[in-house]
Image: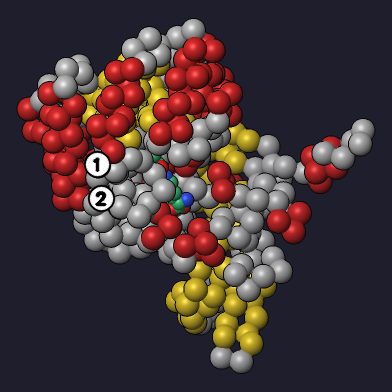
């Protein structure tokens, strides 16, 4: 069961409510529309898959940092994966248990590490200087920090180069030839560092679970080596990265259960606790960006649908050439023909597109058009370019009512940055 569906009547529904009606009832467009029940179902898919293992589902906050969504994920039992001090503060605000949070990053700064040390979050060591900073933070906080070594397993995730992280030329993690240096450094700082496990993150939008199995096999080998030196490590963190069906092609893609099943025997064979760090696969398919069609135009042989949303609200197509499925929210006029359209926004850039070469019925002016799978890395990567201001967010609740879960930013918000200067 998926939250968005278009039955015979040609209207798009979210949990049984016409998106068109929601679009007409809210104060402004574009806006993000989520399904709260779909978020629940996505977490349950992971929870069911993880049965029989001791585990932490560390939701990667970077994918979507809406406070209401975070509170919901925390209530469902998730921990959180953080990449900045502000993400840590937000996780605390949302009520996450800091001992189920993991602080990642190749450039963590001292003051954020001090907060992490004070709160007792797991910290992944990324480099020599990062280790030094973690030691310094532990001393300032007067706390021993639970650390994992972020090891670069050098596995090709077969994804866009911008979202590959676990291959050998990546800026993230440490390489195997340096492992001994890090183990010695941990031993030299017993009051500051407690090595509890190993971490890797291969990349994002991964659609083959064999890749996770290969990486987990390599990581288990590292854990054996680390244990051989007397460390009692008992966490394996395999990161996030599971992809979703952006194409809506009906292709059978691996589900959370396939991911967990492919590493289960390895984890059990060493008596490990498993940490996973999903972002996209928990939140992407729970949301659409809802736009209104401003107009349709043709330049030579090119047809354009111009909508009010843009690369400012949703940059993934412009940045990664990413495909996100697009459809109209209501049936087109009966005489509408079907043509090949680029769906573009009003921003003054040719990179401003939401979709290219899409076969779509010619929409009526003022009608609604959605970009699907917009729950991950869309709002969290939105900007205010061209003073578009970040859009409001809504969700459909469990009882079918629609609530606002974030205010849209306004012109006044922009002016506030200059007050008193
Ligand atoms: N853990 C670490 C260490 C990460 O770097 C990431 C994502 C995740 C977990 C979550 O990965 P996920 O399950 O969401 O794939 N902006 C890009 C994606 C960047 C991903 C960065 N790291 C996009 O829009 O596709």
Disc 2 Cβ-to-ligand 1 distance below 8 Å: no
Nearer to me, 162 or 334: 162
Residue occupying image coordinates x 26% and y 56%: 156
Identify the mark at residue 311; answer none if there is no mark.
Answer: none
Nearer to me, 157 or 111: 111
- Give the quarter of the image for residue 311: bottom right
Residue occupying image coordinates x 39% and y 44%: 172
Residue occupying image coordinates x 13% and y 36%: 221
Whether label 2 touches label 1, CB < 8 Å: yes
Residue 1 percent coordinates (x, y): 30, 44
Ligand 1, image quadrant it occupies: top left
214 vs 395: above or below: below
Nearer to me, 206 or 174: 174
Q: Residues within 10 Å of mark 1 (few under 14, many from 20)?
A: few
Residue beneath disc 1: 176
Residue beneath disc 2: 154
383 vs 351: above or below: above
| Element assignment for label 1 | helix
Residue 208 percent coordinates (x, y): 21, 54
Q: Is residue 421 left or right of residue 315?
A: right
| 2 or 1: tag closer to the N-terminus | 2
| Camera-nearest label, 2 or 1 | 1
Residue 38 visible from this viewpoint:
no
- Give the quarter of the image for residue 264: top left
| Furthest-bottom residue in this view | 300
4 vs 226: above or below: below
Residue 9 percent coordinates (x, y): 43, 60
Q: Residues within 10 Å of mark 2 (few under 14, many from 20)?
A: some
Rounded to the nearest angstrom, the CA distance separating label 2 from label 1 is 9 Å
Residue 94 percent coordinates (x, y): 52, 21
What sort of colour scheme is used for the picture? secondary structure
């Amino acid at each position: 069961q998926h939250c968005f569906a278009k039955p015979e009547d040609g209207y798009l529904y979210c949990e049984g409510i016409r998106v068109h009606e929601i679009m007409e009832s809210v104060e402004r467009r574009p806006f993000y529309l989520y399904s709260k029940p779909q978020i629940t179902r996505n977490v349950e898919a992971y929870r069911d898959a993880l049965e029989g293992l001791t585990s932490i589902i560390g939701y990667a906050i970077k994918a979507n940092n809406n406070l209401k969504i975070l509170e919901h994920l925390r209530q469902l039992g998730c921990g959180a994966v953080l990449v900045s001090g502000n993400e840590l503060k937000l996780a605390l605000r949302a009520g996450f248990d800091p001992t189920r949070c993991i602080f990642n990053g190749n450039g963590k700064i001292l003051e954020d590490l001090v907060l992490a040390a004070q709160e007792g979050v797991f910290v992944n060591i990324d480099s020599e200087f990062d280790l030094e900073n973690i030691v310094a933070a532990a001393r300032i906080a007067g706390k021993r920090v639970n650390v994992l070594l972020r090891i670069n397993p050098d596995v090709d995730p077969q994804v866009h180069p911008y979202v590959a992280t676990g291959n050998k030329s990546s800026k993230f993690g440490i390489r195997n030839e340096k492992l001994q240096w890090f183990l010695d450094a941990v031993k030299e700082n017993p009051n500051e560092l407690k090595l509890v496990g190993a971490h890797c993150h291969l990349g994002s939008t991964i659609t083959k679970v064999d890749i996770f199995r290969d990486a987990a096999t390599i990581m288990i080998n590292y854990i054996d080596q680390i244990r051989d030196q007397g460390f009692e490590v008992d966490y394996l963190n395999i990161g996030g990265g599971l992809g979703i069906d952006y194409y809506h092609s009906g292709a059978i893609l691996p589900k959370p259960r396939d991911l967990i099943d492919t590493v289960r025997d390895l984890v059990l064979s060493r008596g490990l606790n498993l940490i996973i760090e999903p972002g996209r696969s928990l939140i992407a398919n729970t949301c659409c960006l809802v736009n209104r069609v401003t107009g349709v135009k043709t330049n030579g042989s090119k047809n354009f649908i111009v909508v009010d949303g843009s690369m400012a609200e949703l940059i993934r197509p412009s940045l990664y050439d990413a495909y996100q499925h697009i459809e109209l929210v209501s049936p087109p006029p009966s005489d509408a023909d079907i043509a090949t359209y680029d769906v573009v926004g009003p921003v003054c850039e040719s990179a401003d597109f939401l979709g290219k070469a899409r076969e779509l019925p010619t929409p009526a002016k003022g009608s609604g058009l959605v970009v699907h799978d917009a729950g991950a890395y869309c709002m969290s990567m939105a900007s205010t370019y061209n003073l578009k201001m970040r859009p409001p967010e809504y969700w459909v609740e469990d009882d079918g009512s629609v609530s606002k879960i974030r205010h849209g930013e306004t012109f006044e918000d922009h002016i506030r940055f200059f007050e008193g200067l």
